[in-house]
Amino acid sequence: MNLFAEATFQNGRNTLPQNVAAVAAQHRLEVLDAEAIREARALAVRLIGDGVASAQCLIDLQSHFGAAIFGLRQEGALTGLLAAFPLNAEGFQALEQGAFDAVALDTALVARPGEEPAAYYGWAFAATNHDGGRAVMMASVDIHRLLYWAVPTYARAVTADGSRALQRIGFRPHATQAGLFVIAPALAAGVRT
């Protein structure tokens, strides 16, 4: 697959999970299966705290979109976690109105493969070491830059480190919701607004 040609064809509103998986793979992140998702959730709880969606919620999301939960393994150990997904119009509206529950995620708010997204949501970023953190953050940047540049991209910081990391890669605080960050849509691929 020529990822850059496909990304251009999608006009910053990617509808194909395999494109997200291909960008993540460029940073050594793999799509996780149900067993690995349970492991990733345990990692997130250990690093972030108890306010993490259930393993079943994560598994349901992965089944719904197909490429939303990714992990980096180093010497067999899971060292990085990225969970992110496209929102449909209803999900975007719920997010903007402060009614979006990221812990008890309703997959009806998540775009399905082939459905044009209204926004993209970075759900979880966690890593046990520098290499894992770098891979997760760079994959996040490239997924936005190549695939979702024409829609707003959101993330919620739950730690001070998370807030700093989001701002380093271009997120800005949301105008009305504390803890929510956004990257505004760009006019073209690779252009920051």
Image: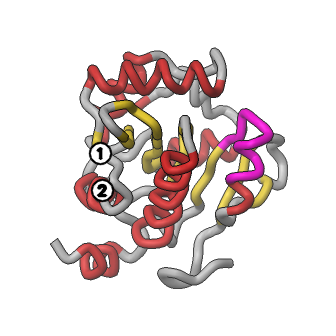
Tell me which corner region of the image, top left, top right, bottom left or bottom right, holds residue 156. top right
Find out whether residue 65 is within the magenta segment. Answer: no
Confirm whether the magenta stretch covers residue 157.
yes
> Magenta region: which residues?
156-165
Between 184 and 164, the residue placed more toward the observer is 164
Crowd class of label 2 (few under 14; some 14 to 19; many from 20; radius 10 Å):
some
Q: Residue at x 62, y 34 (%)?
A: 100
Question: Would residue 80 be found to the left or right of residue 181 on screen?
Answer: left
Label 1–label 2 contact, CB within 8 A: yes
The percent coordinates of residue 44 (x first, y second) are 54, 26
Q: Earlier in the sequence, mark 1 or mark 2?
A: 2
Residue drawn at x 59%, y 61% as measured from the top left? 152
What percent of the width, then of the height, locates residue 193? 68, 78
From the image, give the main secondary structure of the stretch colored magenta.
helix
Residue visible at 69% across and 60% down? 171
Q: CA distance from mark 1 to mark 2?
A: 6 Å
Neighbourhood count class around disc 1 (C-alpha, 10 Å): few under 14, some 14–19, many 20 upward: many
Image location (x, y in percent) of residue 4? 30, 79
Which element type, helix, strand or loop, lies under badge 2?
helix
Residue 76, located in which quarter of the rendered image?
top left
Camera-side residue of 158 and 173: 158
- Identify the residue at horizontal 74%, vertical 42% (top origin): 161
Task: Give the amino acid at mark 2.
Answer: Ala
**The N terminus - image quarter:** bottom left
**Residue 46: in sight, yes or no?**
yes
Residue where numbered disc 2 is placed: 25
Residue that numbered label 1 is attached to: 30
Identify which amino acid the numbered label 1 is placed on. Glu
Question: Residue 169, how many percent across, how many down?
Answer: 65, 63
